[in-house]
Image: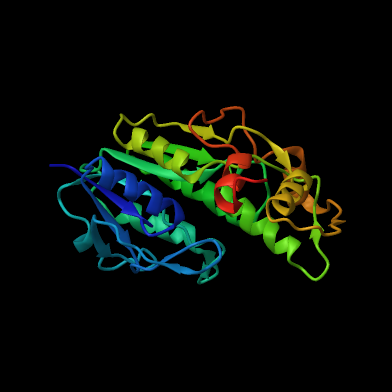
């Protein structure tokens, strides 16, 4: 029986995907450095997944082959190092290169990669690394599908909450964002891995585009807070790209809940 290798299966998205795989009895194995799962607040969360787990450090080029069983024919590549560098290079590039170099390209029928909407238009180092990962996958010779998603609800919440919790709340109010439910992206990835490779990249976003001003206001309302928020001027190429909406897309997920529904679920129905 064929099996899916999920790299980064203990990450935020990986946890949602493996829960879905477990519920629909998908044959999979998680490959990650450790079993610990951390949310966007960096808090450890118990990981009681029922799927198999193998220790696999893709920052190291040796010893990976033994981790990849002969029954694996699909890879769902979710592992990410964010801005961590190794020998001057961002970790995501090293991880993706080592993954590609470690597998038998004749055996892998489908390599699915999660990426981010707008990485080809926003001059952020982490996004540039993701773009290079996409290039490595496209030129690997392995059949692939790349899904670019917009920012998750939890991520948007964590970022704006940190700004609101500063001694003087400062928010770049003109930045745009299109929050999407993590589970909706997991469902999309579930469809992709069980289908044929498209050898293409496509976008998936949340149901509505918001400014950071709107996000901050709705967060404070949901948490019953009343703060005077100072606007942070838009400076630099990254912020200008976000203000133009380069991180948003036209393809909107019909299965994702809205930002308002996310707030109601997390902070209570009376908002």
Front residue (pair 146, 245): 245
As rendered, which of 114 and 211 lies closer to the eye? 211
Please report the residue visible at 56 percent of the width from the left and 65 percent of the height from the top. 41
Outermost residue, left direction?
Answer: 1
Locate residue 246, reporting x and y percent. 68, 39
Q: Which of the image's four quarters has the N terminus?
A: top left
- 63 or 168, which lies in front? 168
Residue 210: image location, x then y, percent = 71, 39
Q: Is residue 190 visible?
A: yes
Q: x and y percent of residue 118 in the render?
A: 62, 41
In the image, residue 251 sits, relative to residue 261, either above or below, namely: above
Query: Seen in the image, is 244 located left or right of residue 60?
Result: right
Q: Is residue 102 left or right of residue 154?
A: left
Quarter of the picture containing the C terminus is top right
Q: Nearer the viewer, residue 114 or 64?
A: 114
Residue lying at 47% horizontally and 49% vertically, measured from the top left: 133
- Side of 11 where 117 appears, left or right: right
Determine whether, in the image, residue 232 is placed left or right of residue 206.
Answer: right
């Amino acid at each position: 029986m064929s099996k899916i290798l999920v790299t980064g299966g203990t990450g935020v998205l990986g946890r949602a995907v493996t829960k879905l795989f477990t519920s629909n009895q998908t044959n999979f194995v998680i490959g990650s450095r450790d079993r610990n799962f951390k949310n966007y607040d960096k808090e450890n969360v118990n990981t009681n997944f029922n799927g198999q787990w193998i220790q696999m450090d893709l920052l190291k080029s040796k010893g990976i082959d033994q981790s990849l069983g002969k029954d694996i024919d699909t890879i769902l590549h979710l592992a990410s190092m964010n801005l961590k560098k190794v020998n001057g290079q961002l970790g995501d590039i090293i991880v993706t290169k080592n993954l590609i170099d470690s597998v038998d390209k004749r055996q892998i029928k489908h390599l699915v990669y999660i990426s981010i909407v707008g990485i080809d238009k926003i001059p952020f180092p982490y996004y540039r690394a993701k773009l290079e990962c996409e290039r490595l996958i496209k030129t690997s010779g392995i059949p692939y599908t790349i899904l670019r998603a917009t920012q998750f609800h939890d991520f948007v919440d964590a970022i704006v909450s940190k700004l609101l919790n500063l001694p003087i709340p400062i928010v770049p109010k003109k930045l745009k964002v299109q929050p999407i439910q993590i589970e909706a992206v997991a469902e999309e990835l579930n469809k992709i891995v069980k289908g044929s490779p498209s050898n293409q990249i496509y976008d998936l976003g949340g149901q509505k585009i918001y400014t950071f001003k709107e996000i901050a206001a709705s967060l404070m309302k949901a948490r019953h807070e009343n703060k005077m928020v100072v606007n942070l001027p838009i400076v630099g190429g990254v912020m200008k790209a976000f203000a133009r909406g380069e991180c948003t897309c036209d393809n909107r997920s019909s299965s994702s809940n809205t930002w308002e529904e996310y707030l109601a679920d997390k902070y209570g129905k009376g908002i």
